[in-house]
Structures are given as C-alpha cells and as structure tokens.
Image (cartoon, coloured by chain):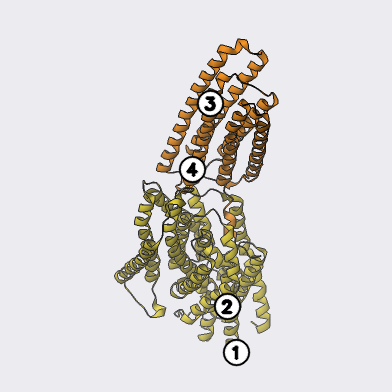
Amino acid sequence: MPRSYISGLFGTSPISPLQQHMAKVQATVEELLPFFQAALAEDWEKAESMQQLIAVRENEADALKRELRLKLPHGLFMPVSRHDLLEVLTMQDRIANKAKDIAGLMLGRKMRFPDTMNAPLLDFVDRCSDAVSQAQTAINELDELVATGFGGNEIDLVESMIDKLDTIESDTDDIQVAVRAILFKIEKDLPPVDVMFMYRVLDWIGDLADLAQRVGSRLELMLAR
Amino acid sequence: MMEFGIIFIVLACVFGLFMAWGVGANDVANAMATSVGSKALTIKQAIIIAAVFEFLGAFLAGGQVTATIRKGMIDAELMAGSPELLVYGMMASLLAAGIWLLIASRAGWPVSTTHSIVGAIVGFAAVGLGIEAVHWAKVGAIVMSWVISPVTSGAIAFLLFLSVQKLIFNTDDPLANARRYVPVYIFLVGFIVTLVTMLKGLKHVGLELNMFQSYLVAISVGIVIMLIGIYFIRRLKFDPNADREYHFTNVEKVFGILMMVTACAMAFAHGSNDVANAVGPLAAVVSIVQNNGEVTQRSLMAPWILLLGGIGIVAGLMMYGHKVIATVGQGITELTPSRGFAATLAAATTVVVASGTGLPISTTHTLVGAVLGVGMARGIAAVNMGVVRAIFMSWIVTLPAGAILAILFFFTLKGIFGG
C-alpha cells in the first residue's frame, strides 16, 4: 500500500466532531417542547414515546462524546487548547443529560401542573431551547474561526452570537421568576411532594439555558488565547 | 585505468535512472500532497502538472545543486591519483540511495532523497577515501541548511497565512477581496520562481541574461500567469447557497485556482532540487570518464544528464507515483486551498532559493515546516506532532543507512573492477 507521510501530519480535526455532538444535543433538547405539550395534555402514551426518543438521542450524543475524547490524544498541535475543547464538550454533554433527566422525572411521576401554569411553562421550555440552539449557532462558527486563524471579523461575529446567547439566558431567568411566582401563589392547595418536584423541574429547565450559556463562555475562553 | 570507461558510464546512467525513478515514485507524491489533499487538483491533473514541471525544474534549474553534489562535498584534488575510486564511490552512492529509497517506501517510512544521497557520499568518501577527503565545512553547511530550511519555510508560511487572513478572510466581503488579491498572489508565485531560475542562469540551455533582463522576464512571466489566472477566476461560478454551511466555500473556490499555480511551482522546485540528487553523482562519473580520469577539470553541466534525470522522475511518477498521489488525496481532509496554498508556496519558495545557492535541502522537510507554520497561525485544526517527530527521526536514521549501504557497494565495485 503506497502512502505518503505528509498526510499523517494532519490529525483528524476535533472541530467537526464537536459540532456534530452539539447538533445532537440540540436535537435532544428540541424534543422537550413536544414532550411537554403531550405531558401537559396528559397524553402519557405520546409523552412516553417522546421520552424514549429523547433518551435515544442522548445516548447517541454520549457515543459521539466518547468517540471525540478518544480522538484527542496528547501531542496534537491545535489552535485551541485541548483542555478548553474537552470542557466545551463536557458542558454540551450536560445539556443533553439534563433534558433526559427532565423528561424521565416528569414521565416517571406522571407529573401534572396546574392549568394556569401551562402556557408560561411551555414558553419557558421554548425559550430555554432557544438558548441551546443559539449556543449551537456559535459552536458552528468554529470551523470558520480556524479558517481565519481566529481573526478579527470572525471573532466579532462569534462575540455577538455569545452576547445574544446571554440575552436569551437572562430572558429565561425572567420567565423562570414569573413561573415560580405563579406556583408560589397556589402551592398551598397542592400536594406538598408534588410541589417539591415541580420546583425541581422548573430548576432543571432553567439549567438548560444556564448550561447553554456556559458553553458560550467556554467558547469565549477558547478564543481568548 | 579507464578501460571500463563506457561500462562505468552505462552503469552510472542505470543507477542514476534508478535513483531518479525512486524520487518520482515516492517523493513526488509528498511534494504534490498538499495540492491534491486540498482538492484543488484531481489526481490526473496532479500527475500531468508533476510530470511537466518536475521535468522543467530539473532541466532548467537543477544544475546548481547537481554541481554541489558532484564536487562540492568531496575534495577532488586528493583524488587526482586514483579517479576510479571517485567513480566507484559515486556509483555506490547512487545505488545505495536508490535501494534505501526503495526499502523505505516499501515499508512506508518517510525518507528524504537528499539525506540519503548526502549520507551515501559522505559515507563512502570518509571510509573509502579518508576523512580528509570530505569537505566537512561544505557538509556542515548542508546539514545546517536542513535545520534552517524548515524554519524559514515555516516563517514564510506563517506570514503568508497571516496576509491571507488580513486581506481576505477577516474583511467584510471575503469573496470580493479574494477575487481582488488572489491574482496578486498568482503573480507572486510566477515572479519568484521565474526570477530565482533566471538569476541562477540558464547557460546550459544557451541563455545568458543580466540582472535587469532577468527581472524583466520574471515580471513578464508573472503577469502572463496572473492574466491566465484572472481569466479562470472570472469563469468560476459562485453559489451563494454553498456558503450557508461553511461561509468560505466560494472564497476557497478562488483559492483553488491559486493552488493550481502553486502546485506547478512546487513541482518545479522539487524537480530542481531532488533530480539533482539523482544526477549529481552521475554527472561526476561522466565528467571523470570523459576527461580521461581528470578529476579537477571544471566542465559545464551536460544538459543530457539533467534530461535523463527528468525522464527518470517522470517514469517513476507514471509507473508507481500515481498510486501514492491517489492515497494522499484521500488522506488529507483538513486542508483547504487557502491553507494549502500558504504551506506549499512557502515550501516551494524556500526550495527554489536554496537550489539557487546550490544547497541540497529536503523538499519534504520544508513542507513539514510550512505546515507547522500555518498551524502556528492557528490555521490548522490539528497537526499530529507524533508524526512530525517520526519524520524527523527517520531523516536522521537515513544518513547512516545511506552511508553504510554506500560503503558496502563501494568496496564491492572496487573488488569487481579493481582499484
């Protein structure tokens, strides 16, 4: 088999696997809204099939994560630090895990929220998935960053994307405060244990946006070399 | 003593062809790797470009390095009494380097043709003729150039890539700027290669120009190539939809044209430097025999010898090299035309300038240095440092390997023909 050693010089790029992983994470989170719609309508059969889909996607994301970790031996000379890259990967991975946990908990306890909460809750989930998809948009710029050698214009573009991500994240905080206020007003009339878990689900949904924001800030650290 | 003269010449030609064939079969692929890997060239185009420009480089610009290999490394004065030893040694060196190339390419080891021939010549001279027969200062300069050349080429690649970023990628309209500046780069490629070739002189093809004329010719050639490039850039079809996934898809199309020109320059540079490795010792044998054992005679490089080297390289490329080029094309996925251009032009420039000074340097050496240079500019997603280390190690091993084989063949030939 004739070969040339020049081709061995170029290690496999970690950039596109990282982007694929994020795309998978985003696809996992995307299913949360339909899951909530089904769960709030108490269509548990549909909710279960959605939950399974989320679990499958999360598994696929895990497989991609492991593959990428194996692809990053020491002794690769990269424009970004190996450590930063693995940190971003870990953050992305947590998002998918969180989505799976939310769906698992809601389905496992067949949780029912009071009707007054339905619309704001769906809003909340929707805005948090927006944060994740904004994080994905930023991660998708990584290959362009390499093409420009992490230069001026492209950096500005990514910075503005991360700013937008921060804006979305603070939106989700506002929505979260509002939703919690609704629950706080009516919590006395509900079974205490259920209320406890409702607060937990709200926290976890909020975590999605927090984690997405942390992907963004890790990305920022990556650029600041 | 020269009763075997014609046999010597025939043997030397056969060995020289063998070595040139080895260069064409194995080494050309590495020189063309970045061009094929960045998908700027199809395999077929790469082979045609390599065949034409390797040949041209060997024929037009190979003389200087040939002279160094022929007489720069060995003190020919000491050989005046026994010219046949020099003949045996040069033949042994060719055979040693050729066989070492064959073994290494079979095993898939990266070797440098330059290192194997230099190792072989120094080896036979030091053992067969005596330590004092080697021009150690000259050999030292060659070895130093092996260190300096990748560093130089890396620095040029770094700066080139930075300029590409500044002028094209980091602007508001990269595509418009690509169409504006890529022709300038094309001019640069044509100008540099032509100028260095001219300044070295083309006496052996009957062309003598002064400094001013050389510059004039280089500028004209640069402009002609630039106009051809502009014509092809105008003909490109841009698809705005292609930029959705990767914003620079269309910009890279423009760089594809530049990469083609750069590939020609690289093949030319490689031909000028590495063919000389094969035909230098052959030229030495021929001049000794023709001058009836006169070693010190200064004679002009015979064009037919460079021609023979060129033919050998193209034959190797046609028979075996195309397979290697094909695997290279699939092996590199991370290289875009813009990165490939910066690396390849840096390497080609370094090689052409080095051939101009007569120093035989390793083409792949400069290419590896150039790739690292682009990496330093944060332009390559992953460079495998393990492979870089392996490449440098194998080059070091190549020196004694060439030397040992050459010593072996030297004493064999001496035994056969008597010395």
What residue type is disc 4 on?
Answer: Glu
Q: Nearer the viewer, mark 1 or mark 4?
A: 4
- Give the structural element (helix, strand or loop) at label 4: loop
Real-space Cα separation, disc 2 to disc 3, in angstroms: 76 Å
Going from N to C along the chain, the mark reached first, 1 or 2, is: 1
Per the rendering, the colour in which chain B appears is: yellow
Q: Chain of mark 1?
A: B
What residue type is disc 2 on?
Answer: Leu
Q: Nearer the viewer, mark 2 or mark 4?
A: 4
Q: Nearer the viewer, mark 1 or mark 2?
A: 2
Real-space Cα separation, disc 1 to disc 2, in angstroms: 23 Å
- Give the structural element (helix, strand or loop) at label 2: helix
Q: Which residue is mark 1?
A: B3
Mark 2 and 3 residues: CB-CB less than 8 Å, in contact?
Answer: no
Mark 2 and 4 residues: CB-CB less than 8 Å, in contact?
Answer: no
Real-space Cα separation, disc 1 to disc 3, in angstroms: 98 Å
Whether callout 3 and callout 4 share a subunit is answered yes
What residue type is disc 1 on?
Answer: Glu
Q: Could you say which is closer to the camera, residue A55 or residue B406?
A: A55
Query: Relative to residue A122, is residue B269 depicted above or below?
Result: below
Q: Chain of mark 2?
A: B
Q: Which residue is mark 4?
A: A141
Q: Which residue is mark 3?
A: A124
Q: Position of residue A50 (x, y in %)?
A: 64, 34
Mark 3 and 4 residues: CB-CB less than 8 Å, in contact?
Answer: no
**Could you say which disc has been placed on residue B275 in the image?**
none
> The C terminus of chain B is located in which quarter?
bottom right
Mark 1 and 2 residues: CB-CB less than 8 Å, in contact?
Answer: no
Q: Quadrant of residue A122?
A: top right
Residue A87 seen in the figure: no
